[in-house]
Amino acid sequence: MKLASRIILSIAIGVGATHLSRHWLIVAGPAFQAGDFTYPWLAARGILSGVEPYQLVATTPMPFPSAFFYPLTAAVWLLPFAHLASRIAGPIFVGLGFAILAFVLTAGPRWRLLVLVTGPALAVSASVQWSPLLTAGLLWPPALAVLTAKPNLLLGLIAPQTRFRSLIPPIIVGLVITGVSFAIEPSWPVHWLATLRANPAASQYRFPLFHPLGICLAIAAIRWRRADTRLLLGMAISPQNGFFYDQLPLMLIPKTPIELVIAVTLSQVGLHYAERAGLGLDPVAQSAARFPYVVAFLYLPALVMVLRRPNESSSLAIAPADQSSSK
């Protein structure tokens, strides 16, 4: 696909994702605000107004528990969005993430765009998340700088990298963002860790490998030379919740159109049943009720896929030449 066509298509997808996210926020109602995006967005507004971000979030009515679980670096990333209303800024942020991910995906065969309609992608648009940018970073390493906002997924997204020289740009950008955060509030790690310890909602994060259904994921280690295997194992030992959006990077594991169609189908089925689990419960209980669906419908299919492949060095990228075989 020519560069101009990739850009136009990516912009169109970004606009569509923006409108879809906006629709979900309207359906969710005013109390939902901009979902999880509301927290770093409000913290960014606190930075601009000179108010301590962690205290500001803790004393403001929020969609979920009033606690800022992100490092301050997340708020620094969102400073360009701070002047917009949350229910406008959030969908734009989602659209930007999907546009970048779409552009990266179109460097390979077009069927890979099906990643954008998987269960995790739908969960991202509904709850306003960082996952599209992080997933793009697996194929375009500069985007991995956003890991400074989501360090819980650091191991899962660094493990698949095959050229560590390519990590220099995101490391430099990440250090700059971190430096800015310390210049704004030198003691923010103390506030962040205190927030994580004090709020029960922080216990919603679990490790797929240690779930009864996920213990078998360790078998993937016999294919350790593969980047997709290291992605699976790295994600399996990264703390995450059961709301499906953190697992979008797993959707890069399918290597053929048939595998991706299977992943799309299973992930959407899993999301459908997961959303019925834990209704009316608090976020911690909801995450626990939905986590088995994450493992069963996202991790276990990925495990089957990597075990079917030879244990040889590989990357997550799929060459454009493969597109001809998928037609």
Image (cartoon, grey):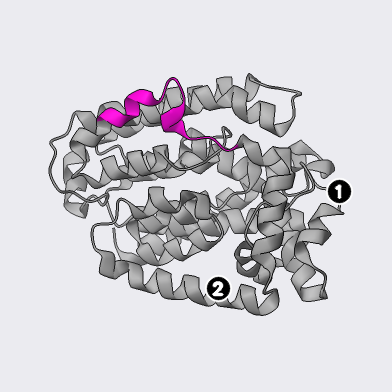
Q: CA distance from mark 2 to mark 1?
A: 28 Å
Where residue 247 sits in the image (x, y, percent)?
47, 40
CB-based contact (under 8 Å), mark 2 and mark 1: no
> Is residue 84 in view from this perspective?
no
Q: Position of residue 246 (x, y in %)?
A: 51, 42
Which quadrant would residue 290 be assigned to in this image?
top right
Residue at the spot x=75%, y=72% of the render?
47
- 71 above or below 290? below
Badge 2, how many Cα within 10 Å: few under 14, some, many 20+?
A: many
Q: Residue at x 64, y 63 (%)?
A: 189
Q: Which one is in front, 123 or 250?
A: 250
Residue positioned most to the bottom = 183
x, y percentage for residue 168? 34, 72
Residue 178 among those drawn in magenta: no
Q: Secondary structure at mark 2?
A: helix
x, y percent for residue 214: 40, 25
Q: Which mark is residue 61?
A: 1
Amino acid on which disc 2 is placed: Ile
Residue bearing mark 2:
177
Mark 1 belongs to which amino acid?
Pro
Q: Quadrant of the C terminus?
A: top left
Q: Any magenta on residue 217?
A: yes
Q: Which residues are magenta?
A: 205-219
Q: Is residue 82 above or below residue 290?
A: below
Whether residue 313 is visible here, answered yes or no, is: yes
